[in-house]
Amino acid sequence: MKRIVIFASGSGSNAENLIKFFHNSDKASVIQVLTNNPHAKVLDRCKKLNVSALSFNRIAFSKSEDVLNILKAAQPDLIILAGFLWKFPAFILENFENKVINIHPALLPKYGGKGMYGKYVHEAIVTNKETDTGITIHYVNEHYDEGAIIFQAKCPVLSTDSVEDVAEKIHLLEMEHFPRVVNELLLN
């Protein structure tokens, strides 16, 4: 059975989608969710879904080996960043080479990098009058949003679309594709 650990910083809709997708799987399961936000809604979702969840601070994550030790104990086959906003430390990535992936709400390499997440990406898409956008699932390296691309899905952006409209289109793409791509990665 493949083991998945998810990192999230906010509401956790992608985390919940993944947990539910793998709930009855005999191939993989989400064994733990970790968050840098002690008030994140993802913690409530995990409680309802009976999945172990922990919050940590910046010292535990990047200045000590606390989070690394939690991961070593969990022995994940895949670490998934689902709306996780902190840059992953190199020393954690070195211990889990090619096992950390992220989902980004744009078609990388466009609209990636520090500060480009959630509504900030959607605002930039609308402001720049893009005609399409989408999601990118990619491996995580030591730079924001620069790891090798695993999968992309596109959707049109209409001239009448608001930031909220774009956000909803992206959310639908995430819900449809993220669990399937994760499943394919784990089975290969």
Image (spheres, rainbow, N blue to C red):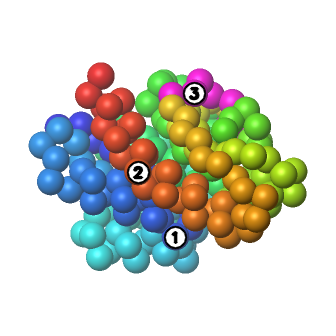
Q: Would you name the residue on which mark 3 appears?
A: 149
Instruction: Please identify, in this view, whether the residue under mark 1 or under mark 2 is nearer the observer.
Output: 2
> Residue at (65%, 48%) from the top-left corner?
156
Closest to the observer, 155 or 65: 155
Label 3 with label 2: CB-CB less than 8 Å: no
Q: Give the amino acid at mark 1.
A: Ser
Q: Distance between the residues labelled 1 and 3?
A: 25 Å
Q: What stretch is highlighted in magenta?
A: 143-150
Q: In which quarter of the image is residue 166?
A: bottom right
Label 1 with label 2: CB-CB less than 8 Å: no
> From what the image shows, is residue 185 above or below residue 167?
above
Magenta stretch contains residue 118: no
- Point out the image quarter for the C terminus: top left
Q: Would you name the residue on which mark 1 appears?
A: 11
> Residue at (12%, 43%) from the top-left corner?
26
Instruction: Please identify, in this view, whether the residue under mark 1 or under mark 3 is nearer the observer.
Output: 3
> Residue at (63%, 62%) from the top-left corner?
167
Q: Give the amino acid at mark 3.
A: Ile
Q: Would you name the residue on which mark 2 appears?
A: 176
- Residue 153 is situated, as x and y percent measured from the top left of the image, at 54, 39
155 displayed left or right of 144: left
Crowding at mark 1 (Cα within 10 Å: few <14, some 14-19, many 20+): some
Magenta stretch contains residue 149: yes
Please tell me the numbered disc located at residue 106. Answer: none
Q: Give the amino acid at mark 2.
A: Glu
Q: Distance between the residues labelled 1 and 2?
A: 18 Å
Q: The residue tagged with tag 2: helix, strand or loop?
A: helix
Q: Pick whichever of labels 1 and 3 is earlier in the sequence.
A: 1
- Residue 155 is situated, as x and y percent measured from the top left of the image, at 60, 47
